[in-house]
Amino acid sequence: MNEPVIDLHSDDYFMREALRQAARAYEAGEVPVGAVIAREGRIIARAFNQVERLKDATAHAEMLALTQAEETIGDWRLTGCTLYVTKEPCPMCAGAMVHTRLARVVFGASDPKGGAAGGAMNLLQFPTLNHHCQITGGVREKECCALLKNFFAEQRATENQEKKIRNSSENTENVSEKS
């Protein structure tokens, strides 16, 4: 019964699970990032961004998944674990990944402006830190990017619509005041 549930080398499978978590974030109006942590071929943690819901800037999918995985295995050291996340981790999350001693980090969409797994910087393999994580990027990249692009396009459309309504309302008030 100790056999892995699926092929240990199936990054595609685990990223699909992370995408399911990202879809939950999208539905909740959160930036659609999802994460899962696998150990010995089994998922031990699942999470999605909950920054808005929890009113907590640190409630990124990765941070929530790391905490859940630590609780699951009963240790803060996540040696032998792989974290799958739909977007390249930010510096905060990458720092936590190094501190928890993750073996590997796999991400979908890269983030050249703020990513800390090789995009803007590489904290996961920073030379002076006491631990380094293996990195694999670009897994199910098109799907991960599409989810983020769609979310932000919807956000901009909503903001533009609200702006138009405000401007229309202000113009109506100005006309009423002149009459």
Image (spheres, rainbow, N blue to C red):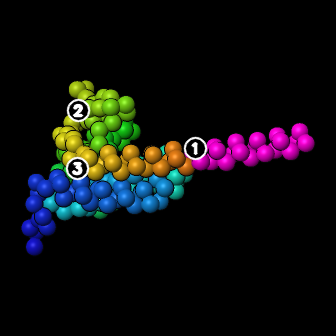
Labels 2 and 3: the sequence-earlier one:
2
Q: Which mark is residue 12?
A: none
Instruction: Name the residue type under label 3.
Output: Arg
- Residue 103: x %, y % from top left: 19, 45
Looking at the magenta stretch, what is its main secondary structure? helix
Query: Which residue type carries mark 1?
Result: Asn
Residue annotated with mark 1? 160
Element type where label 2 sits in the image: loop
Q: Write down the residue under mark 2.
A: 125
Residue 160 included in the magenta stretch of the image: yes
The disc labelled 2 sits on which kind of residue?
Gln
Q: Is residue 155 left or right of residue 66?
A: right
Residue 99 sits in which quadrant? top left
Residue at 57% x, 44% y: name it.
160
Q: Residue at x 31, y 53 (%)?
A: 35
The one nearer the camera, 95 or 87, is 87
In the rendered image, residue 44, in percent from the top left (x then y), is placed at 26, 61
Q: Please tell me whether mark 3 sits on a helix, a strand or a loop.
A: loop
* Residue at x 33% of width, y 36% of height: 111
The part of the chain drawn in magenta is 159-179
Whether pointer 2 and pointer 1 mark residues with C-beta atoms closer than 8 Å, the reply is no
Which percent across, then down, holds residue 38?
A: 21, 57
Q: Nearer the viewer, residue 53 or 93?
A: 53
Label drawn at residue 140: 3
Is 151 placed left or right of 45 in the picture?
right
Q: Is residue 125 above or below residue 77?
A: above
* First reached walking from the N terminus: tag 1 or tag 3: 3
Measured in 3D between alpha carbons, the distance from the residue under mark 1 to the one under mark 3, in whole angstroms, is 31 Å
Residue nearest the viewer, comparing 168 with 42: 168
Q: Earlier in the sequence, mark 2 or mark 1?
A: 2
- Residue 119 picture location, percent across and down: 29, 32
